[in-house]
Image: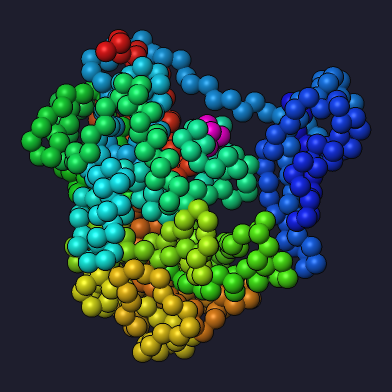
Amino acid sequence: MIRVTGLRLSLDDDMERLPYLAARKLGIKLYDILGWRVFKQSIDARKDRMIYFVYTVDLAVKNEAYLISKINDPAVSAAPELEYRCVETGTEKLPNRPVIVGMGPAGLFAGLLLARMGYYPLLLERGDDVDIRSQKVAQFWEKGELDSQSNIQFGEGGAGTFSDGKLTTLIKDRRCRKVLEDLVEAGAPPEILYTYKPHVGTDVLKGVVKRLREQVRGLGGEIRFRSHVTDLIIKGSRIEGVVINGKEQVPCRVVIMAIGHSARDTFEMLIARNIQLIPKPFSVGVRVEHPQEVIDRAQYKEFAGHPKLGAAEYKLAYHSPSGRSAYTFCMCPGGMVVAAASEPGHLVTNGMSEYARDGATANSALLVGVTPADFPGSGPLGGIEFQRKWELAAYLLGGKNFRAPAQLVGDFLLKRSSLHLGEVRPTYPRGVMPADLTECLPGYVISTLREAIVEFDRKLKGFALDDAVLTGVETRSSSPVRIVRDESCEASAAGLYPAGEGAGYAGGIISAAVDGLKAAEAVIRRFKPLQAR
């Protein structure tokens, strides 16, 4: 196919105009186009008086090779191959089925690929299926009753299930397209294949996750919930099995560890089993909430509210003279701030949106990077100790009932505690306690956030709105550890394949799913498929 980039449509244009524009660009007749598809869509909102959608389109045309050879235009090229091809299967005999620990994106996609290739994987999830999990989350939000095994962090679909369902990634990998195609096949909106910032939303993602699970089952895989892997059986530096819920032993020679970034007890178990872990940088901060209409006006000016545009997003970064950096992360248009704790007595926030993104409030993480130099001690779990310290402080500051401490942006910048809230109503479901956030975050994080808010307001008018709300704390931006692995994705114990965000090799739904595919490919490349069962 031929790829044509830079085709622009106004808000009033229909996408069906794209082949006409492409034909004009190529200097051919419309009937010379045999088929076409949108590869990418982005928005150009740089001009005050007009907003354009900008498209990259792949076309099948008559005399394709001749046409490409004649056209000297950087906007026209041969479209690259998009089809995913799995690696060749290995020759080593696998004595029993591979085990996958965790059913977030990495675990689900590793399981799906192994099932498709005839390995009949066993997927073990410490939490509940997504329906029961949703009930547990709702119960926590309503009554403050936390299930430490099934919550926003743990359960089918992983932490990303209760998020905006963002599918953006900075990695360049053909597997990304494969993940998107599988999500669409499982019920995600088809436009995620080409929109510039694809998202699914929590409400849609729950159904997608269930369909992926049933695909694994339909291909011979087994899935077990409430199956917490509490130990590994290792003999002679080789995996021989796993222990479930402290008692049941399952023999296996391959374990893909896709445990998520909050599996603190599992990290401790791995260290006890002499698996090499190292601390890694991550970020901490708060959630910031604005009226969505303020963000829409700042980004889209007079076109704010146009049905083709939807709720506006932003992505901002600031580098302080101190050497620290602050940035916005996981921005949730028309969404809500959620209670995301996974341990009693510790408070954590996150953000989520439904597919429609039609809430009145926009929220985003507002984070500052931290490194192992900031952690207490030098051990691999120093980052977890750091997280727990500030999560406990936030829990105490909020009143010890999972209410979250909150502060108005105006008060935060003036260095005074908030005594009441303004016109922006916090969406955190357990309720908030007006407070001084300097009591639940490090001083260098607070000072960097203050600088960043002022700078962000110059870039996005209204960001420093006095009544905007800061809700603390967000500490689970990414894993605080990395499980060391080699080029074949294997850890320090043979047969153990760390994967995904919890292992320290991904940062979002797509990159985690891609890393799960890489781990599965490493298994496939080495071992023969199991015989039909």
Identify the image quadrant of residue 219.
top left
Q: Quadrant of the C terminus?
A: top left
Along the line of sight, the residue nearer the viewer: 461 or 195 = 195
Identified at 45% across, 85% down, the residue is: 422
Along the line of sight, the residue nearer the viewer: 252 or 217 = 217
Left or right: where 451 falls relative to 113: right
Left or right: where 166 falls relative to 471: right
Residue 403 % position (x, y): 28, 73
Tell me which secondary structure the magenta stretch mostly adopts.
Answer: helix
Q: Quadrant of the N terminus?
A: top right
Residue 239 % position (x, y): 21, 27
Determine whether 308 is above or below 131 in the image.
Answer: below
Magenta residues?
A: 176-181
Identify the image quadrant of residue 484.
top left
Left or right: where 370 falls relative to 381: right
Identified at 47% across, 19% down, the residue is: 87
Residue 190, can we see it? yes
Is 177 in the magenta?
Answer: yes
Along the line of sight, the residue nearer the viewer: 508 or 434 = 434
